[in-house]
């Protein structure tokens, strides 16, 4: 079942596709709010899903518009998330590990495209033992728009280069993760 060199690669969204870490993310916001003695608006988590901290903190939470303060709060929130993942563990969604194993056995490289911070992905992959399954990761640090978009042509071209495919599809079909 080898298909190495066939020019195929698989791009996975992260949360809701490979893993469900909403509990750790929500709890990290709650811990940060407690540390900072700040209020979390009702519905903040759902409103901020898929967005970067540099959008969530000033626009959804309304905590600060000062770039240095937004950066500080965002770094602390992500550190709290990583602490929670290490404390509570994390498991891939049902079927994810098996799918990744089959793709690897078939020689099909896999990548992650997500609004999540790179260090968060690294820690989660380590905790779940999934590091060997992914050849490339594009994260929040690589995105300069307000909301991460897996259909981004720039993202697809970058991953094609990292996969060594030499070319990229410029339009991705819409795929639902079932959520």
Image: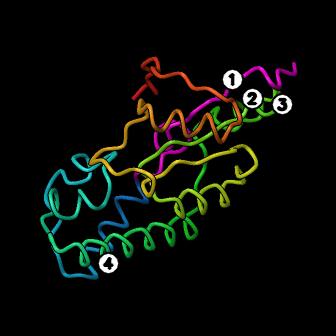
Q: In the displayed image of the protein, which residue is found farthest to the right?
A: 2
Give the main secondary structure of the magenta stretch: loop
Magenta stretch holds residue 90? no
Upstream in sequence: badge 2 or badge 1: 1
Q: Estimate the spatial distance between the alpha carbons at disc 2 and disc 1, rounded to whole Å.
A: 6 Å
CA gap, disc 3 to disc 4? 42 Å
Residue under pointer 4: 72
Q: Count up the numbered dots.
A: 4
Mark 3 vs 4, N-terminal side: 4
- Percent x, y of residue 47: 21, 47
The residue carrying mark 3 is 105
Classify the position of the N terminus by image quarter: top right
Question: Disc 2, disc 1: CB below 8 Å?
Answer: yes
State the SS at label 2. Answer: loop
Q: Nearer the viewer, residue 16 or 62?
A: 62
Q: Which mark's residue is nearer the viewer, 2 or 3?
A: 2
- Asked whether disc 3 touches disc 4, contact meaning CB atoms under 8 Å apart, the reply is no
Q: Position of residue 110 (x, y in %)?
A: 67, 36
Query: Which one is in front in this view, the residue at disc 1 or the one at disc 3?
Result: 1
């Amino acid at each position: 079942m080898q298909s190495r060199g066939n020019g195929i690669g698989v791009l996975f969204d992260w949360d809701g596709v490979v893993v469900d870490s909403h509990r750790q993310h929500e709890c990290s916001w709650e811990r940060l709010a407690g540390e900072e003695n700040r209020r979390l608006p009702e519905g903040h988590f759902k409103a901020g899903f898929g967005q970067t901290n540099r959008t969530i903190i000033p626009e959804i939470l309304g905590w600060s518009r000062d770039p240095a303060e937004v950066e500080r709060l965002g770094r602390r929130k992500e550190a709290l998330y990583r602490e929670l993942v290490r404390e509570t563990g994390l498991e891939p969604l049902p079927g994810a590990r098996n799918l990744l194993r089959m793709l690897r056995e078939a020689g099909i490289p896999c990548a992650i495209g997500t609004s999540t911070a790179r260090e968060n992905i690294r820690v989660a992959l380590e905790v779940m033992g999934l590091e060997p399954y992914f050849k490339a990761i594009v994260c929040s640090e690589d995105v300069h728009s307000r909301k991460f978009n897996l259909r981004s042509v720039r993202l697809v071209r970058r991953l094609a280069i990292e996969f060594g495919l030499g070319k990229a599809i410029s339009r991705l079909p819409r795929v639902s993760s079932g959520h």
